[in-house]
Image (spheres, rainbow, N blue to C red):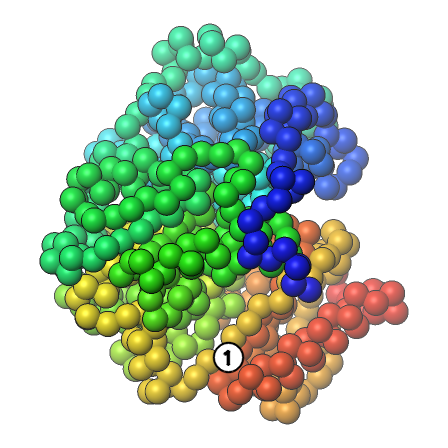
Amino acid sequence: MLSPLAGKLTPHSKLIDVASLIADYYEYEPDYSLESQKVSFGTSGHRGSAFKKSFNEAHVLAITQAVCEYKKKMGYNSVLYIGKDTHALSTPAQMSAVRVCAANGIHIAIAKDGIYTPTPLISFAILEHNKKEQATADGIVITPSHNPPSDGGFKYNPPNGGPADTDVTSLIEKRANEILKNNLEDVAFVSYEKALQSQYVTEYDFITPYVEALSKIIDFKAIKNAKFKLAADPLGGSSIQVYEKIKEYYHLDMDIIHPYADFTFSFMTLDHDGKIRMDCSSPYAMASLLKLKEKYDLAFANDTDADRHGIVTPKGGLINPNHYLSVAIWYLFTHRKNFTKDLKVGKTLVSSSMIDRICANLGIEVYEVPVGFKWFAQGLFEGWLGFGGEESAGASFLRNDASVWTTDKDGLIMTLLSAEIMAVTGKDIADIYAEFEKEFGASYYARIDAPATLEQKKILKNLNADSIDIQMLGDEKIEKILTKASGNGAAIGGLKIVTQNGWVAMRPSGTEDIYKIYAESFLSKEHLSAIQKEAQEIMKGLFSEARFSNAKV
């Protein structure tokens, strides 16, 4: 249900008490007997709130100790890069992690002068280091991404630079929970001051090498020649200083909106549910930037750790993430000489099938995986995946020479690519996508979010295909019921039902207490609504008391 406050500036009553939040981070101790207060790595690391005892210092100490032990076990004896975003809990969490790493004799690199560090810059730093020296540098990103201001997050990136796969995160999660259960007895830590004075902590300039290398993946000459007036909105996140450096280094005519950190994020307009959420793909969270669209040739935004992108054009307004992914893929494989048909396109199974139709037309193989960018990391790292993208506005791609750039989502190259596309083609992103609809058919796509308990999420995550006893969906015969992705055979953690002209996927969120229904139709809005309605009935049946015993969990 849409909140009456959606798209409106945040009232004072909605702002968090930052002092209380940080106090709770240090003072509250999680109850290990409660699932909601354990360490849990979802699709992108562990996330929670100090208010709810799901992201407190105990969690960070335990996870960091587990990471240190994992590094030593794997022989990763190079530097551990640590970055943080602008959420209020991120700085305290980084301080906690530094204390543990130093005590464990782990060499770490943190940003100079406490500067915030976007997720893609951590991935870039890992990969650049591993090209030149021992290939065992890895990283930690302290961020809950676009989540509300009260949240904190912790993500581990191994030496391939991308988000850790489930085989790694399951080990870290298990060990961290053992440490929590034993009241942190196994955690080694020193004071923060002593850690900074130790030989194990160094400062590092994450921004300059990244910005200077951008010319190897983005055509800034074309952007400058187009004489665009640009706007970049970091949404008060960690990309503020990066955009400042990009503007200076490449001499762009670019205004930077909200160029400051505000732990309450009081400048944000509220999301669809009335919560503050720095989601650059949400028209409600992006309402302020949308009001400025006529002032600029192109405007764009990133979430707080800059791994997601939002594109605003004069004609298209906020471009649907699926639409932009489609345009970006088409552009890269038609305008980059090294993007040949030998490269594959990675998409999550809940991304639009418009991507499949475009790729089929170009003769490019699609690599479909479950939700989570971690499934693209190795393909980007090895150079056989030219592009990897998620419907939630996260993507990365190879350099102009088809070598690896980042193996984590990079919202910065995606925003800059939109400027290159419009400069080179002379067309609005929305007009390019409209041409696809004329050629391949119109896509009607939507996602529905609904509250879900831990029990309900567990049921949905562990479904088998025979848990669904239906033959038709939206008046079409069901062609496939999938619980594993076609690209890599990995478990979906939910269910996807496919017909000739539509599909629906149901899965629990890995980061919030909700489940999601994704659906797409290439027939009509009415057909999409029918698919959604039937999917909701399926969910009601699965969650009802009468069906619990029949669901194969």
Tell me which residue sits at (24%, 37%) in the image: 245
- Please name the amino acid that badge 1 sits on: Tyr
Q: Is residue 56 visible?
A: no
- Image coordinates for residue 271, horizontal then vertical, percent: 57, 55
Q: Considering depth in this image, is 530 or 180 the residue closer to the camera?
A: 530
* Residue 12 position (above or below residue 94): below
Q: Considering depth in this image, is 443 or 272 the residue closer to the camera?
A: 272
Tell me which residue sits at (46%, 26%) in the image: 72
Q: Is residue 425 visible?
A: yes
Q: Considering depth in this image, is 308 or 57 the residue closer to the camera?
A: 308
Tell me which residue sits at (31%, 51%) in the image: 231
- Image coordinates for residue 42, horizontal then vertical, percent: 58, 48
**Label 1: few (<14), some (14–19) or many (≥20) C-alpha neighbours in 10 Å:** some
- Image coordinates for residue 329, horizontal then vertical, percent: 31, 68
Q: Considering depth in this image, is 512 or 494 the residue closer to the camera?
A: 512
Query: Looking at the rendering, in which quadrant would you find the N terminus?
Result: bottom right
Position of 156 with respect to 416 (left or right) is: right
Position of 417 with respect to 176 (left or right) is: left
* Residue behind mark 1: 444
Query: Looking at the rendering, in which quadrant would you find the C terminus?
Result: bottom right
